[in-house]
Amino acid sequence: MTPLVLIPGMMCDARMWGGLAAQLYPREVGHVLPTQAETVEALAAEVLAQAPPRFALAGLSMGGIIAMEVLRQAPRRVTQLALLDTNPRAELPATQAKRAGQITRALFGDLAGVLRDEMKPNYLHHGPDRTEILNLCMDMALSLGPEIFARQSRALRDRADQTATLAAFKGPALVLMGEGDTLCPRDRHDLMHSLMPQSSLVIISGAAHLPTLEQPAKTTAALQGWLDQPF
């Protein structure tokens, strides 16, 4: 059974995946949290240094961006690819322009304010667990701290377009998003699905940017179906 490597989103840790690893038992599931570099290329190299020789790979949001770079660097090591609530394009100039102010605020002691005012409110569907999930997101981010926020922000700002990487991948693929995701909207996922016509496109109702926490049963079912595909 091929091991699975999971990469979480920006300022998240393994808790972002909820109980996924337990649900997929006895499959070996490894959580990789690359934090020591400030380019996507170097963060992907961190993942490859920790990953098995061959593995299935899933990433959400920034984790998906890093996963695409892992695939670009080591295509023969990745047997299957799942991209959740992410974006294969380089960052838009308008979004790049916001990064400097966010980094400055975070490094000068207001990481919680940046997260509260500009990021976390955009993450979630308005469901009954919204407050609990937002509190978890804040705890994950504050546990990682402002230096990691700055490094991850710079990596996202300077990332490369990965459409050619996806077009070259022929293995089993899953493109999944929460129906209400405004951070990585539907057109990005339609693009990834078109670049990988062998992929399954799954839209999770009752979720936005973090379906792993908002709709864990639906998300796990989609991931299990993807993992069960032959390669």
Image (cartoon, grey):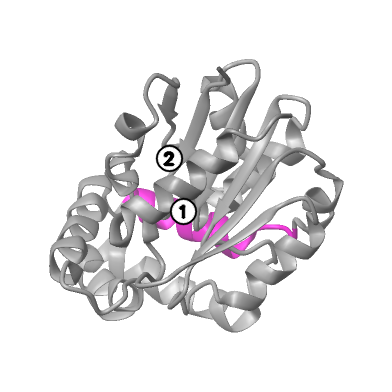
In this rendering, the answer to whether 15 lies above or below 98 is: above
Task: Specify whether residue 71 is in view.
Answer: yes
| Residue under pointer 1 | 152
Q: Position of residue 157 (x, y in %)?
A: 58, 64
Name which residue type carries label 1: Gln
Which segment did they paint magenta?
147-161
Q: Quadrant of residue 114?
A: bottom left
The residue positioned 33% from the left and 51% from the top of the image is 217
Q: Depth check: 101 or 117 in front?
A: 117
Dominant secondary structure of the residues highlighted in magenta in the image: helix
Quadrant containing the N terminus in the rendered view:
top right
Q: Is residue 196 magenta?
A: no
| Residue under pointer 2 | 35
Task: Check disc 1: other Cα within 10 Å, few if <14, some if 14-19, many if 20+.
Answer: many
Task: Check disc 2: other Cα within 10 Å, few if <14, some if 14-19, many if 20+.
Answer: some
The residue positioned 37% from the left and 49% from the top of the image is 148
* Structural distance between the alpha carbons of marks 2 and 1: 7 Å
In this rendering, the answer to whether 141 lies above or below 220 is: below
Q: State if disc 1 and disc 2 touch (CB < 8 Å).
A: yes
Q: Position of residue 23 (x, y in %)?
A: 33, 34
